[in-house]
Amino acid sequence: MKKMIFSLIFLIFLIVSCGETTGVEPKNRGLAGFAVEFAEDFDLGSPENRIENPEGGIVTTINITALGYNKKPYTKFNGEVEIGMLYGENAAVSRITMENGYAGNVEVKMRYCLDNDRVVVQEVKKHEGEETYSPTGKMGVSPVFYTEVATISAIQGTTKGDKGHSSAFNNRNLTLKDREMVVIAVIEGGFYLHEVGAEDYSSVYMYTYSTPYVDDNREESMFLPVGTLIESANGSVFEFFGFTEMSFPTFKPVYVNKNGKKELKIDKSLIPEPKNINDILTDNEEMEKHEASLITVENVTVAWFNEEDSSYIEYSQFPLETSDGKPIMAQTLYTAPLFNAVAEKPADGKTSHHYNFTGILKQHTSARPSMWILVPRDMNDIECLDCE
């Protein structure tokens, strides 16, 4: 939330200052802001020719010049500034002291960059008697530089390592493109999008808040079909209790021309085979790689649960157990409501039938410990192995 507020303030700053300086000085004297320049050999890239974004970050140097309200160097400034980024993170020294209005060859290590970004420099002052600092509102930004475009695997696979492995791009609006992407499921007020060819971190939930519709000449309007290829999609990355979503997305399907008519391009052969996760159910690091992806658990039974519990009453959520005792939750309310989990739970000497369950893998970190949930796409994803 703090980062979101900062970003909003900063965007207002950009509009007012056109990317140069800001600050309110009643008599137009003193420090107004900063000029931030990259080293001469730093390639800014462009929307058509983007620079590489190595795993460890983009390392370069910047020169910072204090400016007065006349936009000329303000050499009387001697104070501290913090060096950050509009979207990403500076992993080098973040606070320095400027002398005589200048600091040169300051190293920056820019991580978690996608699409485009800027280095941000702002004056800070230390609270008297404390070790904390606050910004004064005097700021400056670097020119825009352009890195690799966003992909599903980058959003899902680049994490901060905290509980639930939150995406490093949480709270950022991004556009997915330049990869072949296919719809693998349409459930729960949204759809699941898969990056074709990616093995791990390959899928993400696009939360449309309602059933997604598309235009197609075969029908004036229709539900988004599974197997539809998506050319691009835009949305805001959001962590819902550890489950990475792209909220309020817009998306552009791929269309083909058939007999002079525009039709959706649908190719279900691009939907990957579900990944068997029986062996990794207790390994959160490995499970994270398959979040929002198609998975399957084999030879599981319904474990005992309290059908009066709110999780079952509200969501038809109940536990499954593998033959060697590993747990995973299932949720069937919206997609497979005919499955009667209460009839299957063990009681009075009765045991559950054995099943193969297939579906989408979700996560919910409010549970203790973190809970992984399997959501079947429909009743066909539930296969009974020993039913008559």
Image (cartoon, grey):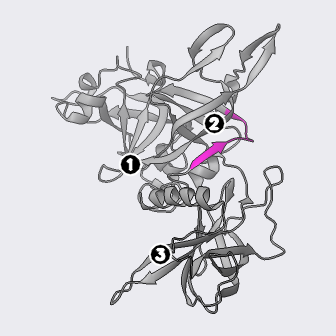
Name the residue that disc number 1 marks: 241
Q: What amino acid type should be assigned to the residue bearing mark 1? A: Phe
Along the viewing direction, whichever of 242 and 383 lies nearer the viewer: 242
Residue 157 in view in this figure: yes
Q: Is residue 44 left or right of residue 167?
A: right
Mark toward the viewer: 1 or 2: 2
Q: Is residue 232 left or right of residue 168?
A: right
Circle 1 — which element? Answer: loop
* Residue found 66% across the figure and 55% down from its top: 114
Q: Is residue 144 left or right of residue 136?
A: right
Along the viewing direction, whichever of 16 and 65 lies nearer the viewer: 16
Along the viewing direction, whichever of 357 and 85 lies nearer the viewer: 85
Work out whether mark 3 precedes mark 1 in sequence or the reverse, and give the earlier one: 3
Name the residue that disc number 3 marks: 136
Over which residues does the magenta segment extend? 173-181
Numbered disc total: 3
Q: What amino acid type should be assigned to the residue bearing mark 2? A: Ala
Local crowd size for mark 3, using a 10 Å CA cut-off: few (<14), some (14–19), many (≥20) = few
Q: Residue furthest front?
A: 27
State the image quarter where residue 35 is shown.
Answer: bottom right
* Residue found 24% across the figure and 25% down from its top: 342
Name the residue that disc number 2 marks: 233
Work out whether mark 1 precedes mark 2 in sequence or the reverse, and give the earlier one: 2
Local crowd size for mark 1, using a 10 Å CA cut-off: few (<14), some (14–19), many (≥20) = some
* Residue found 66% across the figure and 63% down from its top: 19
Circle 2 — which element? Answer: strand
